[in-house]
Amino acid sequence: MLSLSGKRIVIAISGSIAVYKMAFVVRLLIKKGADVRVIMTPASTRFVSPLTFSTLSKYPVFTEVISEEGWNNHVEMGLWADAMVIAPATAKTLGHLAHGICDTLLAAVYLSAKCPVFIAPAMDLDMWAHPATQRNIQKLIGYGNYIVPVGEGELASGLHGAGRLAEPETILSFLEDFFAVRQLMKGKKVLITAGPTYEPIDPVRFIGNRSSGKMGIALAHACAKRGAEVHLVLGPSSLTIDHPLVQVYRVETAGQMHKEALALYSDCDLGIMAAAVADYRPREVADKKMKKSSDQMEITLVKNPDIAADLGRRKMPHQRLIGFALETDQEQQHARGKLEKKNFDAIVLNSLRDKGAGFQYDTNKITILLAQDNKPRVFELKSKAEVAEDILDITNDWWPNESE
């Protein structure tokens, strides 16, 4: 396990009876050589004094944006940290973070943070099970945060069940595992295509599809988390990504995506073709809005370049290529054929028949087929963030131990 030595960790504490456990977390982090700063909400100071945490961390504890010492720069703290741990995270805190309500220093630092954020919830079992809480959890996961699972056992109410703050050793292991995973793709360059393409008919109309780009952006987050330098070629999408290891190239058409992908892939170790590229485009594009002139309109379509196939032909021995297939019948047979034809190392299969999978959803259900293995890997319905991790796990055998 990699050491936490030298890592800069912000511990952000909200008001719960479980606050006492965070003293042990801070102590364990300090023993591992981490540099720790502590933020507390005013409510949390009723359970454990800030003096306890300042003594353990050797630094002042911050509780307000404006204190007797002056303005506490939340932006600076958010930029300073290698990781932020919000624990215990109460139901109120989860709700405020999920909806961007900035009423505490903790929330201000969270909204300014550029580092990975780990959230360890703590509350009574009925509060934890409530649909509003679970919806907030899914929102926070969708933002790219990491949730430390709650424990089960006796709760402060006297009830028994899920909702306990994870044990200090569990929180520490979560951080250690993260920084270990962060090394898996360090030094690697990854090209990802994502989103739809729009092929113009005239200045106001286009041919497109319903792809949102969510899967490709989740993959970009996951690659960056593992230390890779990511080049994301993103078609028309309302989504965005802000990460120091991710460079975004905005495009509209398949031709533009083709040009960017070919230019970038030669310098990359891995290509992931997650975009839903239009197969055809209008042969002619009107320079003015086309007016209704009859009951019918005929548009002649011509084939777009096959980005994935062109990259497959150019693939060098040290490079790898992952494709995507969205099928409606004979799914595995068609996906296997595409894998072989386009010289993929793996292909991710989606089926429109699976509820919760496909365009626009925050979840996905996939099957992965490998070029060197005839046994398909079938996964259950998961968030797209989790699916991205499953996809990247297949690359662990492609570059073993190179980062160690």
Image: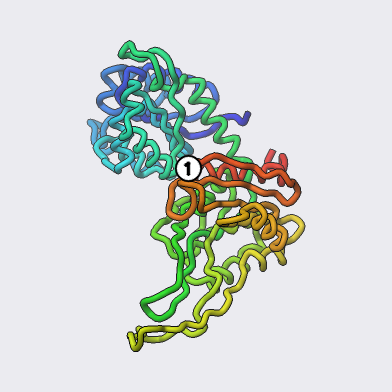
Expressed as whole percent of the image width and height from the top left, the position of residue 222 reads 54, 46
Left or right of 400 in this view: 263: left
Q: Which residue corresponds to the image point at 34% horizontal and 30% vertical from the top-left?
A: 39
Residue at image position (57%, 74%) is 304
The answer to whether residue 269 is left or right of residue 197 is right
Q: Nearer the viewer, residue 342 or 404?
A: 342
Q: Residues within 10 Å of mark 1 (few under 14, many from 20)?
A: many
Looking at the rendered image, the quarter that the N terminus falls into is: top right
Residue 395 in the image: above or below residue 17: below
Tell me where residue 161 appears, x and y as whole percent: 40, 17
> Please, which colouring scheme is shown?
rainbow
In terms of image quadrants, where is residue 389?
Answer: top right
Residue 246 placement (x, y as % from top left): 51, 54
> Residue at image x 39%, y 59%?
238
Residue bearing mark 1: 383
Indicate the amino acid at tag 1: Ser
Q: Quadrant of residue 210?
A: bottom left
- Residue 323: x %, y % from top left: 62, 57
User: Is residue 272 in view from this perspective?
Assistant: no
Above or below residue 41? Residue 386 is: below
Q: Quadrant of the C terminus?
A: top right
Which residue is at 62% across, 69% downward? 306
Identify whether 65 is placed above or below 114: above
Secondary structure category for the residue under label 1: strand
Point out the residue furthest to the top here: 158
Q: Quadrant of residue 177?
A: top right
The reply to whether residue 121 is in sight is: yes
